[in-house]
Image: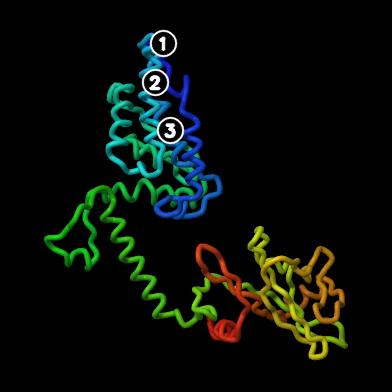
Amino acid sequence: MTPHRKKLIEVALPLDAINKESAREKSIRHGHPSTLHLWWARRPLATCRAVLFASLVDDPSNDLPEEEAKVERDRLFGILEDLVKWENSNDENVLGRARVEIMRSTGNNPPPVLDPFCGGGSIPLEAQRLGLEAHGSDLNPVAVLITKALIEIPSKFVGQPPINPEARGNIGNEGNWRGAKGLAEDVRYYGKWMRDEAQKRIGHLYPKGPNGEFVIAWIWARTVRCLNPACGAKMPLVRSFWLSKKQGKKAWIEPVVDREKKSFRFEVRTGEGLSPDGTVNRQGATCIVCNTAVPFSYVRAEGKADRMGQQLMAVVAEGQRERVYLAPNEDHAAVAGKAKP
């Protein structure tokens, strides 16, 4: 029977370096798989890379006296500390050193890696990066699609040049299409083409903000007529008027009511202050104009009778590394009325 050989992960790890790089990943956006699609339990790539390496590489104490083993272990720690850095994710020199150690410890026959609940695909991705045969599965089709996009599709186009017309026109200037760079170039080209085409065809349905801001969301409220005969105002059904509760970035919708005209409009407020209470709670709704309590049975009946309306409350736009909340204008409401599916 072959005696058990301890792996590096069973003895010691440079945890401070691994933890530091894993925490740092949260602030990295450009080029990180997390930008492909949101996944709520994504494992840090640095952690996955470190665990895979340390699970396959033998600890030096298997073959060396303690003093010599410590020196050799420090050398392996150096490889690991370089390996977990984000900027070294595709550094062939760093990855090559790690692969050599894995091959040495596995007799040039490393085991395949299977992640049966792969989720966002971090473990199969890092296994593939270390030169290992990687397999993943998941019951959630979104997780399967994410992992396919990360490890299965790119691997089919390794080393191949792009095929888009712009790239094909540069004959004699093919460039270096190592890895999946050719595929990435095609994705960028055709992604831009699709966005430009969409802008030409339906861009008029997405007016910009008052200062040219690119709008990313419109926030609407359902409305019904107040059942108070003396009022009859169009009342919004809103659980909360808060837009953002982040410290230093508070924003909320402020209803401005004209009781004489039995009407209202919405403004966006920011800074210190409190949002007004919503008009809907567990007991029912409240008219924003006359404060009449309206039961859910009436709201449901209005909905079934197709007498519900809607009103634009706020517009969300892209700012400088943050969201900007804007009061709606007539253009946005008018365009929404024209657009038909």
Identify the residue at horizontal 76%, vertical 83% (top origin). 234
Question: Where is mark 1, residue-wise?
Answer: 66
Image coords of residue 299 (percent x, y): 78, 74
Left or right side of 142 for 102: left
Q: Residue 326 occupies which quadrant of the picture?
A: bottom right
What whole-number distance in Å separates the C-alpha atoms at marks 2 and 1? 10 Å
Give the residue type at disc 1: Glu
The quarter in which the N terminus is drawn is: top left
Identify the residue at horizontal 66%, vertical 58% (top origin). 247
Identify the residue at horizontal 29%, vertical 31% (top origin). 97
The answer to which of marks 2 and 1 sits earlier in the sequence is 1
- Residue 50, label in figure: 3
Circles 2, 1 touching at the beta carbon (< 8 Å): no
In this picture, is 107 found above or below 243?
above
Q: 100 or 197, which is in the foreground?
A: 100
Element carrying mark 1: helix
What whole-number distance in Å separates the C-alpha atoms at marks 1 and 3? 23 Å
Question: Where is mark 2, residue-wise?
Answer: 73
What whole-number distance in Å separates the C-alpha atoms at marks 3 and 2? 14 Å
Element carrying mark 2: helix
The answer to which of marks 3 and 2 sits earlier in the sequence is 3
Identify the residue at horizontal 28%, vertical 51% (top origin). 180
Element carrying mark 3: helix
Structural crowding at the residue carrying mark 3, measured as other residues with C-alpha within 10 Å and reported as few (<14), some (14–19) or many (≥20): many
Structural crowding at the residue carrying mark 2, measured as other residues with C-alpha within 10 Å and reported as few (<14), some (14–19) or many (≥20): many
**Mark 1 or mark 3, whichever is nearer to me:** 1
**Count of all numbered marks drawn on residues in the image:** 3
Give the residue type at disc 3: Ala
Image coords of residue 20 (percent x, y): 49, 38
